[in-house]
Amino acid sequence: MAMWVFGYGSLVWKAGFNFDERLVGFIKGYRRVFYQGSTDHRGTPEFPGRTVTLEPADPHEVCWGAAYKITKKEEQEIALTEPLATTPTVSGVMVYIASPDKKANVNYLGPASIQDIAKQIVQAEGPSGPNRDYLFQLEKALLQIGCEDEHVIGLANEVRRILSESESISHNS
């Protein structure tokens, strides 16, 4: 039996598992936010990075991403454990949404100002690389599928501003 998995973060550009089919699509009633902490890939327990999760939004709001059809049982297991309207629609797609309950999800960081999230992303780095690479890869992948996500673009621009300022300070020192 086939299973569909919807990716709205790193799965948009890097599946990390074998799949039979990939469709660009969206889910309704949710928005993508950088509220999930990453202590194992884009940060450390001492200095967590931030990755995306979904939060409920206006019922008409959409979150674009990629849906993957997986038929092989072993690939379904990998996909389920991978950390990480005008288009064809598929119902019954599995979507991971991190719990905002700090007891159930100790890595949930929650809302913060765009400036504070950007500062954290600039500084965080984990085994999978700098947190800013995750942000920039997500921004690029979303633009490639025609999605201009205001939260992602605004955050990426703020990270670029911080990096530019720190670069000019280091050149003037």
Image: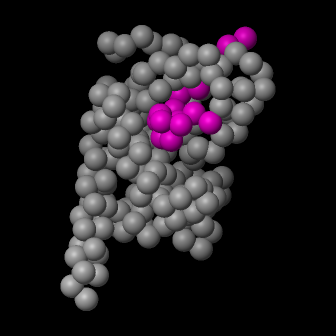
- Closer to us: 125 or 154: 125
In the rendered image, the vertical position of residue 12 relative to residue 134, given as above or below? above
What x and y, as percent, mark residue 92? 58, 17
Q: Quadrant of the N terminus?
A: top right
What x and y, as percent, mark residue 154? 26, 51
Left or right, 68 with respect to 76, comes to left
- Closer to us: 88 or 133: 133
Q: In the image, what residue occupies the spot 72% across and 34% down? A: 78
In the rendered image, the vertical position of residue 13 relative to residue 22, given as above or below? below
What x and y, as percent, mark residue 125? 52, 65
Give the number of callouts. Answer: 0
Q: In the image, what residue occupies the spot 38% across and 32% down? A: 63
Q: In the image, what residue occupies the spot 32% across and 12% down? A: 86
Left or right, 77 with respect to 162, comes to right
Left or right, 142 with respect to 69, comes to left
What x and y, as percent, mark residue 49? 51, 62
- Closer to us: 97 or 17: 17
Q: How is the image coloured?
A: one colour
Residue at the extreme front of the image, as rendered: 171
Q: In the image, what residue occupies the spot 47% across and 34% down? A: 12
- Closer to us: 169 or 7: 169
Residue at the extreme bottom of the image, as rendered: 173
Can residue 29 be spotted in the picture? no
Magenta highlight on residue 15: yes
Magenta highlight on residue 61: no
Can residue 20 be spotted in the picture? yes
| Residues drawn in magenta | 1-16
Name the quadrant containing residue 137. Answer: top left
Q: Quadrant of the C terminus?
A: bottom left
